[in-house]
């Protein structure tokens, strides 16, 4: 099975034998290689869910090997192993697509824990290959020159040192996962594992098993012991996306991890130590959730001491065109159509749109536009926002003022939503109270829609 096959490329035969024997005993099908050339040949001859690669492999281009992994189908989870202190190498390998970076000596239990994430990572890539892949075209979370994004970069760089938890706050699609990855790759923990989990929609039982692991017999079906993601993170970084959706019992255990640096596997008596730095993210107002009794107040104060708010696109309109150009470069490269570009009129329409889905939605709109246009120049007519086609320039009346264009756009969205303010506000990416005020101030009559 794909999910149980791993490429083990290490120049040291003793290390290969030791790691290979351990993984084989835990159900992995191990394919060894002693150098880059052998690793490439072995990899091309099979299908792998993971690859463990020695950074000092001989007889070939190590960077080319990582690049081969990145364009494979399925894309394997890549774990790079190197000597301690190689932070610059860690940053470079992450940029080349590596998922984890371990330093010697390698702890076999930690390595197995990381490998157990490989099948889930493959499923995640195939289930949501659109947004994260396209967002991956912007590894720099601070691209742009707006005041809002420059302030975010200053705050993020200031908070890089240390091991206190960080809370990333922002709407859907603003790039919270991109920022979390950047924080890890540019911290002193860059040479350690980076583990992430999206908590949205996960049950309490599943979350507890994934985070804390379990002992054999801890519950029905627990035939063997399994380490959790906290153990897998080691001395690295654990990123918990949508922490606001976690169950209160899980929140209590996370508080213990933060305050006491300890936890227990399910069914275990022994306390285990954790050295991972926790990054958390949410699109919710956690303060409001605390008031409603849905989020623990003590955990809220522990993770929100150093919040990083990622601004939505509508607060950084000057950055929209540069972001779109960068995304188009990635789309051009993937589609084999070099030279894709936006007309100035198309850029202006992008800059005026409210972007409720932020970067993720912008990537989707550009992908659709690239498919819809037969030329290399994308015009306004090819831009579609969640199925709504923007009228061509001839219908937008080029003599309209910005105020008149704003009113026309609000009226158009209200008409599409049959005058429903809540749905219209969501589509426009503004609070309902703001839309009510705009409707009143501009004299828009909803009853006629």
Image: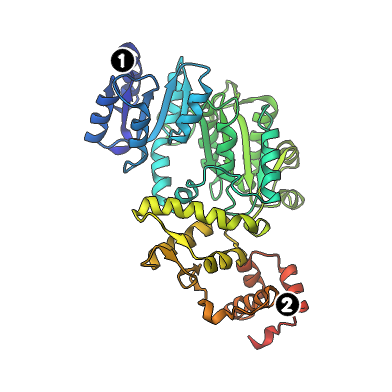
User: Quick one: label 2, few (<14), some, or many (20+) residues within 10 Å?
Assistant: some
Look at 70% across and 65% down and name the residue there.
431
Q: Secondary structure at mark 1?
A: helix
In the picture, measured across the screen, residue 388 lies left or right of residue 53, that is right
Can residue 84 be seen here? The reply is yes
Q: Position of residue 216 (x, y in %)?
A: 45, 27
The image quadrant of residue 36 is top left
Position above or below: 53 against 202: above
Residue located farthest toward the bottom when viewing the structure as drawn: 448
Front-most of 27 and 136? 136
Which label belongs to residue 439?
A: 2
Task: Work out how far the residue at label 1 is from the one at label 2, CA to CA, in angstroms.
Answer: 71 Å
Q: Position of residue 304 (x, y in %)?
A: 73, 40
Q: Position of residue 445 (x, y in %)?
A: 70, 85
User: Quick one: label 1, few (<14), some, or many (20+) residues within 10 Å?
Assistant: some
Front-most of 342 and 415? 342
The image quadrant of residue 299 is top right
Query: Is the N terminus in the top left, top right, bottom left or bottom right quadrant?
Result: top left
Residue located farthest toward the top when viewing the structure as drawn: 14
Q: Secondary structure at mark 2?
A: helix
Which residue position is annotated with label 1?
Answer: 17
Q: Position of residue 34 (x, y in %)?
A: 28, 19
Which label belongs to residue 395?
A: none
Can residue 226 be seen here? The reply is no
Look at 47% across and 35% down and name the residue there.
95
């Amino acid at each position: 099975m794909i999910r149980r096959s791993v490429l083990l490329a290490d120049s040291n035969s003793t290390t290969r034998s030791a790691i290979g024997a351990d993984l084989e005993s835990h159900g992995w099908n191990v394919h060894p290689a002693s150098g880059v050339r052998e690793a490439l040949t072995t990899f091309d001859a099979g299908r792998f869910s993971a690859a463990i690669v020695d950074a000092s492999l001989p007889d070939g281009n190590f960077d080319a090997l990582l690049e081969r992994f990145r364009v494979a189908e399925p894309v394997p989870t890549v774990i790079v192993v190197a000597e301690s202190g190689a932070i610059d190498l860690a940053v470079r390998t992450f940029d080349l697509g590596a998922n984890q970076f371990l330093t010697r000596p390698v702890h076999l239990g930690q390595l197995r824990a990381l490998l157990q994430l490989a099948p889930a990572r493959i499923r995640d890539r195939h289930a949501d290959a659109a947004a994260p892949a396209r967002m991956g075209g912007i590894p720099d979370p601070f691209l742009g020159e707006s005041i809002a994004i420059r302030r975010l970069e200053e705050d993020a760089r200031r908070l890089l040192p240390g091991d206190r938890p960080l809370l990333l706050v922002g709407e859907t699609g603003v790039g919270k996962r991109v920022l979390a990855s950047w924080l890890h790759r540019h911290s002193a923990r860059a040479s350690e594992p980076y583990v992430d989990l999206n908590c949205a929609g996960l049950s309490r039982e599943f979350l507890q098993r994934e985070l804390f692991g379990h002992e054999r017999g801890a519950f029905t079906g627990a035939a063997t012991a399994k380490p959790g993601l906290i153990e897998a993170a080691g001395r690295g970084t654990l990123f918990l996306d949508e922490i606001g959706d976690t169950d209160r019992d899980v929140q209590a255990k996370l508080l213990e991890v933060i305050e006491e640096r300890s936890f227990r596997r399910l069914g275990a008596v022994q306390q285990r130590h954790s050295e991972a730095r926790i990054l958390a993210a949410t699109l919710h107002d956690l303060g409001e959730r605390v008031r409603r009794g849905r989020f623990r107040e003590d955990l809220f104060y522990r993770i929100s001491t150093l919040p990083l708010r990622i601004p939505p696109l509508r607060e950084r309109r000057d950055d929209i065109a540069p972001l779109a150009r960068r995304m188009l470069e990635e789309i051009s490269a993937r589609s084999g159509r070099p030279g894709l570009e936006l007309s100035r009129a198309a850029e202006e329409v992008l800059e005026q749109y409210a972007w409720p889905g932020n970067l993720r939605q912008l990537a989707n709109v550009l992908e659709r536009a690239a498919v819809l246009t037969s030329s290399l120049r994308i015009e306004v007519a090819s831009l579609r926002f969640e199925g709504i086609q923007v009228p061509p320039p001839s219908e937008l009346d080029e003599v309209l003022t910005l105020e008149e264009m704003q009113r026309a756009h609000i009226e158009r969205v209200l008409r599409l939503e049959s005058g429903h303010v809540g749905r219209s506000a969501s589509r426009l990416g503004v609070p309902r109270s703001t839309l009510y005020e705009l409707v009143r101030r501009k004299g828009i009559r909803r009853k006629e829609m």
